Image (tube, rainbow, N blue to C red):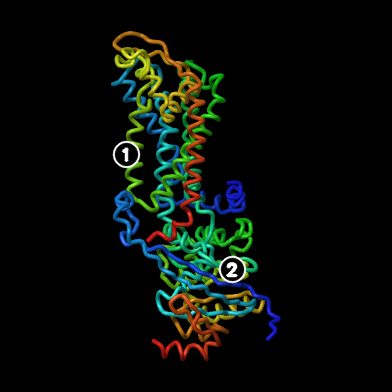
Amino acid sequence: MLAEAKELWRFRELLVSMVERELKIRYKNSLLGFLWSFIIPLVTTAVLTFVFGNFGSIGVESFSAYILAAYLPYLFFQQSVLDSAQSILMQLPLVKKIYFPRELLPLASIIANFIHLLSGFAVFFAYLLFIWIQHRGASPFQPTTWMLVPLLMMTVMLSTGLGLLVSALNTFYEDVKYLTGVVMYLLFFLSPITYLSEMVAYSRVNQDHGGWIFKLYHLNPVAALATGYRQYLLAPPTVTIDGVKHSSVPIDPLYLVWTAFVSIAMLLIGYSVFNRLKWKFVERP
Amino acid sequence: MMDERIPAIEVRSLRKRFRLQNAAIGSLKTALLWWKRRSVKEFEALKSISFDAYQGECVAVVGRNGAGKSTLLGLLAKVYKPTEGSFRVRGRLAPLLELGAGFHPDLTGIENIYFNAVVLGLTRKQVRERIQEIIAFSELGDAIHSPVRTYSSGMTARLGFAIAVHVDADVLLVDEVLSVGDFDFEQKCLRRVSDFRAAGGCILLVSHHLDTVRQFADRCLWLKAGEIVAEGTPSEILPQYLASS
């Protein structure tokens, strides 16, 4: 694996070029270009503010901030894995023509998406600042905001591991792409993205089972990350369920330790599967 | 015969075997139905071939479809892993990228130059330094700012050629295309190719165009079913090759 890392370093110029190309292609034929990567989170915020502020109110102030905190990293995770899945097949003519470390292709997709995630978070913090100025509510920065760094690292490792795995397998079995799409879709609902993990904690089924559902639920690294982003970037919310006010339910940091473990394992598994298969990409009939 | 020349490519008993699966790969179904997967056939695309290509030389590989020409280029470009044997390339090797391989249709000529030149081994700084030279050589003028999808095949080939000859490769792998564009451009390519060879560059050319082979190659390798059946000057080999088909 060290030899592979060295090889990657040797090809860093190409990686940068691939990322640039990826970013250019994405918005090539659009008038607003890169602005789209700010417009999407901005519009999402506006729509969410309206929808949850008026329809699905659970008594949480600036609920859209809570949604965004989890939705932005989820969007990165989903998009980078799905883009990776396609990356090798889309570039197969080039792959068949010249040597370069094959992992550059999925990595370029992931890095390009990561840049979009960072611009998304820029919008996120700008939004928090805006709320703060307007309502003098919670400060846009929590004492635990620094946790964004380890959270992002875990998210990137998890996405990269899964992206490498899926891109290698999809080159041989195109079912993998569809399967991944379904898994992503299910993970979206199985993780606290459009709702809060407090709703899981105070749910009847969780209360009946002595809190086990809540624990099991957060063994899913995507769920733990979504709750994690909220917990460390935003003030603890007070939720109103069935007219009763409940305090926020933080998760034990041990869940994030578990998530870090899963992410690293995913990265190692993904990369070793990729390395085992990468020479066969071109020999695919 | 003592040879004073320095080999740019040394190929030693190079062998490449492909696994052909009857059911082919393509869906999970074929992977799951493993008991049906008995028909794994092996196909030897190259059967232990050896040759040298020297600096300043242009070697053409001729042969029918399926003789192993592209496999040879693929092995030298490190796209395939050899089953057996080895090869050595002195200096940097660059394949001439054709339409569809390196070019993205939605990107402009300039953007494609940047990407392709870096794929072929330049740093971005080096590309910036010689971008004007590449554009001038391609003779694309203002079209260089248009997306490549608007180019004619001749224009694309010119762009590919302009990039390939500006990346300071020591060995060029050429698949089919060498004469692109009109007469003037072709003359320029010829001059450039001879300059390249005078400076010690080596060209490995695969072509069905026997005229191209006659025009460029010093030496011919005749590949047949994965083996070199004859080797010599184009005037020796080509008549035999033509007679055999």
Under mark 2, the amino acid is Phe
Callout 2–callout 1 Cβ contact below 8 Å = no
**Percent x, y of residue A20:** 51, 50
Q: Which mark is residue B87?
A: 2
Looking at the picture, does residue A238 appear above or below residue A100?
above
**Percent x, y of residue B208:** 44, 80
Under mark 1, the amino acid is Val
Q: Residue at x 52, y 81 (%)?
A: B221
Q: Residue at x 38, y 10 (%)?
A: A246
User: Which residue ends up furthest to the top in the rendered image?
Assistant: A244
In the picture, the quarter occupied by the C terminus of chain A is: bottom left
Q: Is residue B129 visible?
A: yes
C-alpha separation, residue under disc 2 versus residue under disc 1: 45 Å
Q: Is residue A23 visible?
A: no
SS type, badge 2: strand
Q: Rate crowding at label 2 as few (under 14), some (14 to 19) or many (20 or more) other CA atoms within 10 Å.
A: some
Looking at the picture, does residue A268 appear above or below residue B93?
above
**Percent x, y of residue A128:** 48, 24
Task: Pinpoint the chain carrying mark 1.
Answer: A
**Percent x, y of residue B8:** 63, 73
Q: Rate crowding at label 1 as few (under 14), some (14 to 19) or many (20 or more) other CA atoms within 10 Å.
A: few
Q: Nearer the viewer, residue B41 or B88?
A: B41
Q: Which mark is residue A182?
A: 1
Looking at the picture, does residue A9 appear above or below residue A209?
below
Tag count: 2
